[in-house]
């Protein structure tokens, strides 16, 4: 009985204590936990990053085969910033059907850190290894892979193997963290951009200035190899995905945070929930660059004010935390002066904030020439451009920092790139390339071969004397090979072994000399995409339907993709909004989106989901309806000025793949780029402006007639022609002599 009474007494005591805890106000211990949680959310902390090969655009396995192969892959990291817990996770597998001595090595920044001998018929090649945490001035961790497969046993035995293959998975990645307080300048923040960049805007409905700024920055990012996602600051009634949010337990009872703890997709009910998303550094708000207009700053301020009100009710001590947050002039609450670009803090991450009127110059700043110069927290951009070129030619060495010297065993490539709008004289296109190269003698008597490509079109090749002296390779550039962004490649090939294989193959130097240049000519008549691109690269006009700015996050995707494909200059182009019901007469070359152009004879007509395409004579050769989320792009050559007209069909396609325009004057576009391209005039897509399908300016061009190679190549034909011509001349002279004899 005593034991039973004692048990009841303990139970009653516990119940009284529990009831007391339920009825008393929120204690200081709980309040302290809330303040501590909020302080942790508003304090800069290490940022964790994961950069995979897939994020770099490598979507297929990187394969290594043959007897030897190597490849360097550059993984972006914040420049001049110490990396914490940096680890490389290499994933892959191999097949070894041909046997032999099969190995591969992994190097980081040129130092071999791991090697594997592959002995099984097949298997995995996963490697997890730490990476030196030292800052990288270049802004890249260089991952080098080298593969060797030797199956021959005797001298000069064929060593080619098709059954030994190493495949590196696109899921391989570099993980690291860094202290955001160490990223203090614009150049470092830019170097830390992932491949998929979030461009933040104030809302889905933008004014003209902010819409203009967004497309310019988007094109600049696309030209830098980034994939742009335009995201608006969430609003009430926005639907968001809360998966992945980590909510501190101390804040789980706060209404704004408890609403986000439900998981899955939810509809935002109030501004406090938007503020909670900001404090939690939600993935949808992990922006790298933002249009810092008044709407964005007011939206951030209102959201933080609302969530801070709920937090103060739960713990008054959090007021001091928010007071410190508001006083920090490095967040998006502080106004951004005109023509300014600055590094700001947003949701605990460094972000490049751009004033709307600074976007055009910011696009020039992010060009390859000036990208590493903004070593400052903020800049006032008054004018960013390039010096005028009045020489009619461009030095290839000035286009980028391509290495001029190569050691070549079997094959080596020298590569440089340029944009029509940013690198050349406005309104001019490449006419020819004069490549000066030199090569050292090798161990074989077979001369090396240098081949010149532009955009993977072989323009010319030459067997080199390889005596260490300069040699000229001169090639014409056909207009069909020219794109808004162009790649010039000079490929060197050597015989890798000496006579009878008595010597070990080794590399011998070759050079592309700095006096190599590209000669320019004025762009010719416009009749298709290829001839229109140079016109848009200079002083052009971008016309956008005024309704598009009410749905900015979707329509900007189309504007950015098409403007990039058309070669529109984000620094020089003029921007205007217009109504669909008011046809426009452009006063310069143009790119229009859902705008009627006055005086143009439309080859394409779009009404709702109905599309008709006709030829130059008006005969319809394509007529269909029922489409959704595609667009038709046409080259307009009969208006006052030539231009491109974009017409959406059944909605706006969200273009996911970067593409370039080439031949044809009508293109159907979907999510994956160009679906079909046609020349409505009915002529072949790749005829030059002069009607010749060769790029040498004609068989009897002055350049051919003054080229020794031309005469040597055609010696037999020319000799036969000379004999025939001489024979006919002699026949004519004999006939004249006979007539004179008769007359006498």
Image (cartoon, rainbow, N blue to C red):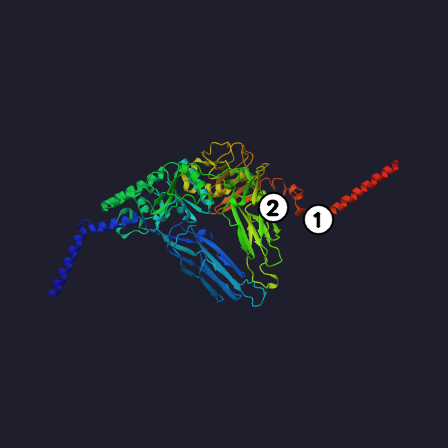
Residue 597 percent location from the top left of the image = 51, 34
Q: In the image, is 123 to the left or to the right of 677?
A: left
Count residues near mark 2 (Cα–Cα under 10 Å), then give few for <14, some for 14-19, many for 20+. Answer: many
Residue 102 percent location from the top left of the image = 50, 64
Q: Quadrant of the C terminus?
A: top right
**Residue 492 visible in image:** yes
Residue 383 percent location from the top left of the image = 44, 37
Callout 2 secondary element: strand
Q: In the image, is 312 to the left or to the right of 2?
A: right
* Residue in the picture at 12% in, 63% down: 6
Q: Quadrant of residue 359?
A: top left
Q: Which residue is most to the bottom?
A: 153
Q: Which residue is most to the left?
A: 2
Up the image or down, 282 lies above or below 743; here it is below
Q: Quadrant of residue 685?
A: top right
> Could you give the CA–CA distance between mark 1 and mark 2, rounded to whole angstroms?
20 Å
Residue 149 percent location from the top left of the image = 52, 63
Q: Which residue is mark 1?
A: 715
Q: Please state which of residues 363 and 591 is positioned toward the viewer in this rendering.
A: 363
Q: Please state which of residues 505 and 276 is positioned toward the viewer in this rendering.
A: 505
Q: Which residue is mark 2?
A: 474
């Amino acid at each position: 009985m005593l034991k039973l009474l004692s048990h009841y007494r303990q139970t009653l005591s516990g119940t009284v204590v529990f009831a007391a805890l339920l009825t008393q106000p929120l204690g200081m211990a709980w309040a302290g936990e809330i303040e501590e949680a909020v302080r942790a959310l508003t304090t800069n902390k290490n940022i964790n990053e994961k950069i995979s090969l897939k994020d770099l655009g490598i979507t297929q396995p990187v394969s290594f085969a043959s007897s030897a192969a190597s490849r360097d892959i550059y993984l972006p990291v914040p420049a001049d910033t110490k990396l914490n817990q940096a680890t490389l996770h290499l994933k892959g597998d191999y097949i070894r059907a041909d046997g032999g001595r099969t190995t591969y090595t992994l190097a980081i920044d040129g130092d071999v850190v791991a090697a594997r001998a592959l002995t099984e018929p097949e298997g995995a090649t996963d490697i997890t290894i730490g990476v030196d945490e030292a800052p990288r001035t270049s802004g890249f961790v260089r991952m080098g892979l080298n593969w060797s497969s030797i199956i021959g046993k005797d001298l000069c035995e064929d060593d080619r193997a098709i059954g030994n293959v190493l495949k590196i998975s696109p899921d391989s990645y570099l993980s690291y963290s860094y202290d955001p307080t160490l990223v203090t300048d614009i150049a470092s923040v830019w170097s830390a951009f992932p491949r998929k960049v979030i461009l933040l805007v104030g809302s889905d409905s933008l004014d003209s200035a902010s819409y203009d700024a967004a497309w310019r920055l988007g094109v600049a990012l696309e030209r830098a190899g980034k994939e742009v996602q335009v995201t608006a600051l969430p609003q009430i009634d926005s639907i968001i995905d809360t998966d992945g949010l980590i909510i501190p337990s101390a804040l789980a009872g706060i209404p704004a945070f408890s609403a986000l703890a439900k998981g899955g997709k939810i509809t935002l009910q109030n501004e406090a929930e938007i503020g909670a998303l900001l404090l939690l550094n939600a993935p949808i708000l992990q922006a790298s660059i933002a249009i810092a207009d008044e709407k964005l700053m007011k939206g951030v301020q209102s959201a933080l004010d609302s969530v801070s009100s709920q937090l103060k009710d739960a713990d008054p001590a959090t007021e001091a935390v928010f007071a410190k947050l508001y006083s920090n002039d490095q967040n998006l609450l502080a106004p951004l002066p005109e023509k300014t670009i600055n590094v700001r803090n947003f949701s605990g991450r460094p972000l490049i904030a751009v004033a709307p009127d600074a976007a055009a110059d910011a696009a020039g700043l992010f060009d390859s020439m000036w990208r590493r110069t903004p070593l400052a927290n903020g800049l006032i951009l008054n004018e960013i451009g390039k010096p005028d070129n009045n020489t009619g030619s461009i030095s290839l060495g000035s286009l980028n920092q391509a290495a001029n010297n190569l050691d070549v065993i079997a094959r080596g490539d020298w590569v440089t790139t340029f944009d029509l709008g940013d690198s050349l004289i406005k309104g001019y296109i490449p006419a020819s390339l004069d490549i000066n190269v030199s090569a050292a003698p090798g161990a074989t008597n077979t001369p090396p071969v240098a081949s010149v490509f532009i955009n993977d079109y072989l323009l010319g090749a030459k067997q080199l004397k390889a005596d260490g002296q300069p040699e000229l390779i001169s090639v014409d550039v056909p207009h069909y090979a020219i794109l808004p962004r162009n790649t010039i490649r000079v490929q060197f090939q050597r015989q890798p072994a000496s006579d009878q294989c008595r010597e070990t193959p080794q590399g011998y130097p070759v050079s592309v000399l700095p006096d190599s240049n590209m000669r320019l000519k004025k762009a010719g008549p416009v009749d298709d995409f290829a001839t229109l691109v140079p016109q848009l690269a200079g002083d052009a006009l971008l016309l956008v339907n005024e309704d598009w700015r009410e749905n900015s996050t979707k329509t900007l995707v189309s504007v950015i993709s098409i403007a990039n494909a058309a070669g529109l200059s984000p620094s020089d182009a003029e921007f205007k909004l217009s109504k669909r019901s008011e046809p426009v007469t452009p006063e310069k070359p143009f790119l229009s989106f859902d705008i009627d152009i006055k005086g143009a004879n439309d080859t394409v007509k779009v009404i709702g989901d109905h599309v008709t395409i006709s030829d130059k004579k008006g005969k319809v050769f394509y007529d269909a309806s029922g489409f959704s989320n595609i667009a038709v792009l046409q080259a307009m050559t009969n208006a006052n000025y030539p231009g491109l007209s974009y017409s959406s069909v059944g909605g706006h396609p969200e273009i996911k793949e970067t593409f370039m325009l080439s031949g044809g004057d009508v293109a159907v576009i979907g999510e994956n780029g160009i679906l079909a391209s046609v020349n409505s005039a009915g002529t072949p897509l790749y005829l030059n402006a002069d009607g010749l399908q060769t790029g040498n300016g004609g068989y009897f061009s002055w350049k051919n007639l003054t080229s020794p190679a031309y005469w040597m190549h055609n010696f037999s034909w020319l000799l036969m022609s000379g004999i025939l011509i001489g024979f006919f001349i002699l026949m004519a002279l004999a006939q004249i002599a006979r007539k004179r004899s008769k007359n006498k």
